Amino acid sequence: MSVSSDHPYSPAKRVGDHIYVSGALSVDKNYEPVSGRREALDAALARMTERLATADGTVDDVVKLTYFVTDLSLREEANEQFEEHFAQARPARTFVEASALPYGATVEIDAIAYVGER
């Protein structure tokens, strides 16, 4: 994603050994919301992973995730997704309900990654 007046931020920003990933929405390439509960979670995680990769990070580097959802009942599916994708080193996570998200999305995920030596 390029910077525009609608997206005036960096998708991911590396500062030293840390990468800060902007919120990734559960939308397709045309910014249409992805339908389906698990599908929306997977779409947001995939977009977050793509953004992380632009700064040379991987999901194994993630130390903190924040999920913003429009329905707290997504927590069970989010927990399943979390266990599948972060089986080895589980990052810290926050799960927050928001009244609305851009483009009609139901999920947004941001992240902080550490890419230094552990």
Image: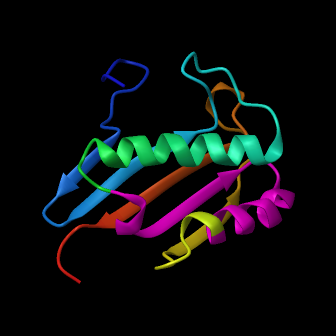
Identify the image quadrant of the C terminus.
bottom left
Where 50 falls versus 81 (above or below)?
above
Name the residue rendered at 50%, 40% in the picture. Answer: 47
Where 78 falls versus 7 (above or below)?
below
Q: Quadrant of residue 67?
A: bottom right
Residue 117 sits inside the magenta stretch? no
Name the residue rendered at 78%, 64% in the picture. Answer: 75
Decide if residue 87 is on the left or right side of residue 104. left
Residue 115 picture location, percent across and down: 23, 67
Residue 110 picture location, percent across and down: 48, 53
Seen from the viewer's position, the closer of residues 91 and 5 is 91
Where 65 falls versus 105 (above or below)?
below
Residue at the right extreme, as displayed: 73
Name the residue rendered at 30%, 23% in the picture. Answer: 3
Asked if one can make out residue 99 in the rendered structure from this viewpoint, the answer is no
Magenta span covers which residues? 58-83
Residue 13 picture location, percent across and down: 25, 48
Decide if residue 108 is on the left or right side of residue 79. left
Asked if one can make out residue 64 in the rendered structure from this viewpoint, the answer is yes
Residue at the left extreme, as displayed: 16
Display coloring = rainbow
Residue 68 sits inside the magenta stretch? yes
Residue at the bottom extreme, as displayed: 118
Name the residue rendered at 60%, 69% in the picture. Answer: 94
Residue 57 picture location, percent across and down: 29, 55
Identify the image quadrant of the N terminus.
top left
Total marks in image: 0
Q: Quadrant of residue 34?
A: top right
Seen from the viewer's position, the closer of residues 4 and 65 is 65
